[in-house]
Amino acid sequence: MKTNTFIIIVVCFFILFALVSGCIEGYFKKTETVLVKLDSQENIQWISVIQNPDYATAMALARPQFNQFTQTSDNGFFVAGYYSNRSSGYTSLRIFKTDSRGNPIWDEKLAGVESMGEPMISPIQWKDGGYSVILSGGRVYNFDSAGRSQGVANMQDPICRTNGTACYDLTPISLTQNPDGSLSWILTNGNFSTSQTTLVAATLTRNGTLLTKEILPLKISAGVTDFIRTNDDGWLSGKGYRDDAPGGGDEILIEKTNASSDIIWDTVLGACNKTASCNNDLIGMHESGDGYDIIYQSYPQQSNESVPVDTISARLDSTGHIVRQERILDLSGRHVWIFANGGSRADFSEQSQKIPQNVLDSAANANGTNNPIFDLRSFIRTADGGYALLGTRYYWK
């Protein structure tokens, strides 16, 4: 009797495994990439539907940080993303270039990319017409103007080889493309024994040649997610802050240091109904004039995924006092600087509900059949003051 029971359990397990595997591999029959161009008033100018031949964007990789794009110098778009091949099962880094109306000009794929599924920081176009795709682990994949591979550089290797920098927990925090064609990186180098983080500033070429490196004296407690250098040679940093008091929750701690790395003020931000525990997620920081602009998102801690999310624009003066906090109600309320590094922050794109519904409906239905589902990936500000959206359309079986 026990033997029969065991056999039944084993058979059921294999049936369940087969069903689950079938769901993972075959729960949609095809996908399409969709580009949408909006003017500055959020009116649709055009929608381009790009086929994904032999590709299916795996849902596990279908998050904004795995699909990014940027506008190119000819007002077209350069798109990079991970796509799995439905017949072989392998995943490739796919890049393609469009014209100013979203029509594909060339389409290339690079198989065997290391750490497949690693989030992207940003795709970049260079002045010579070439392109780069930069991954969060420090690898830079370079391409010529026609999308042909020009090799890969690991930015962390030259940084780690000099001055005895320990490379455990070395994480890029910010990236800037300089006018001379170099890349400026700000990284953190964690220290597990002290639970503190040292900042490392480095400038490299896109081929991985180290030009400058500085280990900054600033010591920041673990958990900081954003840094910006301020005009007085100090730093502004932001991190999560846990308030365990009744009605508290996960808030945001903003700290300001001077040029000597001393903290001169700090401010806590959070804006949701204090009758419930709240989440407050930092999106970005920017120095302007004699103060600082902070964008974050605030929402009650609930299991319901449809809970409304408020996007907040906060203004701090030079001493850290909160001058104002306002809800951002539409795309035009977003500051230009939030779009500065190509695609918008992944969490910003995921949680924000500010894309007009008619735009999402049009993206889902343009030139489509069988009621596909449109899933927004990323959006950017365009050179004409408008916006562009990148998404994937799914056709379910």
Image: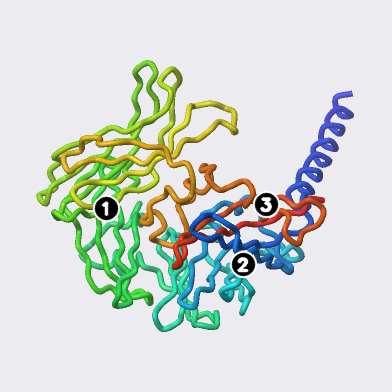
The mark that comes first in sequence, 2 or 3, is 2
Alpha-carbon span between mark 2 and mark 3: 22 Å
Residue topped by disc 1: 228
* Amino acid type for the residue under numbered disc 2: Ser
Nearest to the eye among marks 2 and 3: give it: 3
- Residue 314 place in picture, x, y as percent: 32, 40
Q: Quadrant of the N terminus?
A: top right
Residue type, mark 3 in image:
Phe
Above or below, 128 relative to 48: below
Tag 2 residue: 92
Q: Amino acid at mark 1?
A: Ile
Q: Position of residue 204 (x, y in %)?
A: 30, 72
Residue for badge 3: 374
- Residue at 66 percent across and 55 percent down: it is 58
Which image quadrant is residue 274 in? Answer: top left
Q: Is residue 332 left or right of residue 96?
A: left
Q: Residues within 10 Å of mark 1 (few under 14, many from 20)?
A: some
Question: Residue 149 appears at what percent x and percent y?
Answer: 52, 79
Position in image of residue 283 (x %, y %): 40, 45
The residue lying at 30 percent from left, 48 percent from top is 190
- Whether residue 127 is visible, yes or no, is yes
Asked if 284 appears above or below 74 in the picture, the reply is: above
Q: Are marks 1 and 3 in contact (CB under 8 Å)?
A: no
* Nearer-the-camera pick, 217 or 291: 291
The disc, 1 or 2, on the residue closer to the chain's N-terminal end is 2
Between circles 1 and 3, the one closer to the viewer is: 3
Quick check: 290 left or right of 124? left
